[in-house]
Amino acid sequence: MKVEIDSAALADAVAWTTRVIDARPANPILAGIKLEAIDGTLQLSAFNYEISARHHIEAGIDEPGTALVLGKLLADITKSLPAEKTYLSTNESTMTITSGKSTFTMQLMPDAEYPDLPVVPAKLGQVDAPTFVQAVSQACVAVSREENRPVLTGVRVQFNGDKVIMTSTDRFRLARATFSWTPQNLDVNTTTLVRGSLLRDIARSLDEHQNVIVDFDEDSASLLGFENAGRVSTSQLIDGEFPAVDRLFADDYPIQAVVDRQKLIGAIKRVALVAERNAPIRMVFSGQEITMSAGAADEAQAQEILDIDMDGDDITVAFNPSYLIEGLSAITEPYVRMKMTTAVKPVEFNGQQEADSDESMDYRYLLVPMRITA
């Protein structure tokens, strides 16, 4: 293999592809990144049995060929190369990397032992990248960190015609983002469960000027694929039953309050300064005001009052302040509507553009109040 390639493009492609390589791979061969020089491109791939990453970049190919080398080491080398052309060449046992006056030699790994990457499923549909990034950011708010319950570490993704619904829950809260997309088939109606960490990772590395293509084949419904700007990722789906969460949304909320979102977040952060770890902040809705307080009588205390536009009876609820801030921060509109039934049932949060407009249902955040003593 003999290849001439732009140094920056190579460093970027290697960094993106090797992100799926585990720090301690189950099989040493999976520490490798596979490079294939063919037809004017350098193709890169990595795999960890669950997630695969494929990328390709333009290159001058003097001699086609294949090389398998340590991925993380190659990433470290390529990001340190001078901003010039880089030349890759292989012999029977090594790959030489030359850029400017820098030269590195890497040992080749036995590429015959490298596993075949999964076949990318058929195209299911596509959406513009900014819409996808926002939906993933919102939907992943409630992804659980409990690895012993894999189902809760995932995001349920429902493809229903021209709508996609992403939902996550960690049992204490629920986040749901809905967006429009362009399906290959308008009759599509399928549900998948994909790891939230993978969705976040994909969203972080997207070219926002290019669409995101989602790949899925119902006949072999164990793999979900994502394509963007020449980069292709696949992920094994989580095997398990997502909780029946739709029933948690109330049909009617008799108590509703609208408040400026940034003012509310600022007040919560200030009041929470005196709250001990996992201690709630109390929110008293009365008249057209909300009074937030935290702290114990014999320790530090804080209180702040905000004006609100409220309908319904007075109510007192208490929340984990971190969960509250995370959910509110995912709302993009300037105002938030809090919708309540009782002091112990889940409260729904929705964004809205104006203080007197209807709420948006594109993002719905449910948070279970904490029980407090009177």
Image (tube, rainbow, N blue to C red):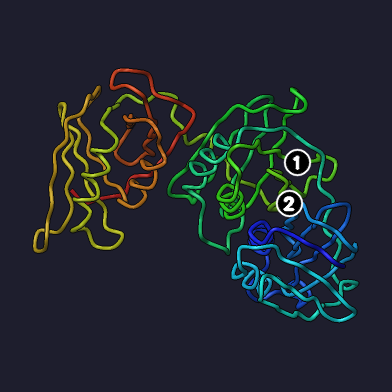
Residue at 84 percent of width and 52 percent of height? 40
Quadrant of image for the N terminus: bottom right
Could you say which is closer to the camera, residue 28 or residue 102?
Answer: 102
Q: Does 108 sit above or below residue 357?
A: below
**Amino acid type of the residue tagged 2 in the rendering:** Thr
Q: Does 127 sit above or below residue 228?
A: above
Determine which residue is flagged by label 1. 215
Please tell me which of labels 1 and 2 falls first in the chain: 1
Among all residues in the image, which is located at the extreme front?
Answer: 101
Where is residue 353? Give x, y as percent. Answer: 36, 24
Determine which residue is flagged by label 2. 234
User: Left or right of 172: which side holds 199?
Assistant: right
Residue at 75 percent of width and 41 percent of height? 215
* Displayed quadrant of residue 308: top left
Q: Does 249 sit above or below residue 143?
A: above
User: Left or right of 11: which side holds 315?
Assistant: left
Residue at 69 percent of width and 25 percent of height? 161
User: Left or right of 205: which side holds 86?
Assistant: right
Among all residues in the image, which is located at the extreme top?
Answer: 357
**Amino acid type of the residue tagged 1 in the rendering:** Asp
Q: Residues within 10 Å of mark 1 (few under 14, many from 20)?
A: many
Q: Are marks 1 and 2 in contact (CB under 8 Å)?
A: yes
User: Left or right of 204: which side holds 16?
Assistant: right
